[in-house]
Image (cartoon, grey):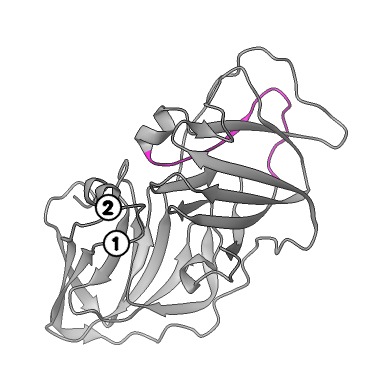
Amino acid sequence: MVNGTLSPYRKVADERVRLRLLNASTARTYAFGFSDDRTFDLVGTDGGLLERPAAIERLQLSPGERAEIVVTMRPGERTVLRSYPQDNYGDAWQQRFNGGDDSFDVLQLRAADRLRPSPGTPAELGTPEVPDGTEAVKTRHFDLKRSGINGRAMAMDRVDETVTRGTTEIWTVRNTNGMPHNFHVHDVQFRVLEVNGEAPSGALRGPKDSVFVPNGTTMKLAMRFDGPADPNTPYMYHCHLLHHEDQGMMGQFVVVENGRQVGGSGRHQHQHQHQH
């Protein structure tokens, strides 16, 4: 289902089409590609443009992740945006029952017999406004398990982390749980610095607020906390697979002005609302 329509198609009148993709599924991770395996340009991730386009044939998006791609079409042709099988699950059981074996059509593109000319994708797109980690003042570690994060299930009356407004931190996120997870942080866009000690792929080089963290993966993320400070009202970090989140894979952090501490220990109101 795409935008409320089953088995949808889109009529195309231009040589290049820009698609904005949002994975709004509660648990499924998609591996997007086209039925003829054509290359397309990734130009944007969760929070904005990449520094330069990344030419790819597959794009993986876990729940809550977004991307913008540019597809080149030829007059009169048809192609299908499809989700393909994935092999980055903990074992065959996890792969089968979490959708890793599935292949299915998502959206058909139908090009007109005559297409309006389109300019090529620019070689340079912009400078992502996310920190590179060089000014980080603190490192935090988050171990992802279905039972909770860092060994603790979500508790509404517990603040797990306190962050100083205006500072940059590096968060290291690890999944050794045997099943796929992802990690979403409220109020920030971050830069992926490393994936298992290596530089990230092109699909992870833009501003992000959600990342897919398959089993056996450790990621380093750099983020700056410039949003509103409030010692009494926490932000959230959590797995964006809904059934994992509901079972406790979530924590709370507050952003405070320099020198301030977390507010009272009373029960916090959980305002978990996304406007992506």
At x 69%, y 22%, the residue is 232
Tag in front: 1 or 2:
2
State the image coordinates of residue 184 (x, y, percent, origin top left): 51, 45
Quickly name the residue at label 2: 95
Mark 1 or 2, nearer chain start? 1
Query: Circles 1 and 2: CB distance less than 8 Å?
Result: yes
Few, some or many C-alpha atoms within 10 Å of disc 2 (few <14, some 14-19, many ≥20)?
A: some
Report, in whole angstroms, how far the alpha carbon at label 1 lies from the one at label 2.
Answer: 8 Å
Tell me which corner region of the image, top left, top right, bottom left or bottom right, holds residue 110: bottom left
**Vertical order, 147 against 13 (above or below):** above
Q: Secondary structure at mark 2?
A: helix
Quickly name the residue at label 1: 86
**Vertical order, 163 against 21 (above or below):** above
* Residue 83 highlighted magenta (yes or no): no
**Vertical order, 207 against 256 (above or below):** below
Which stretch did the figure color magenta? 226-241
Amino acid type at mark 2:
Gln
Taken as a whole, is the magenta stretch helix, strand or loop? loop
The circle drawn on residue 262 is none
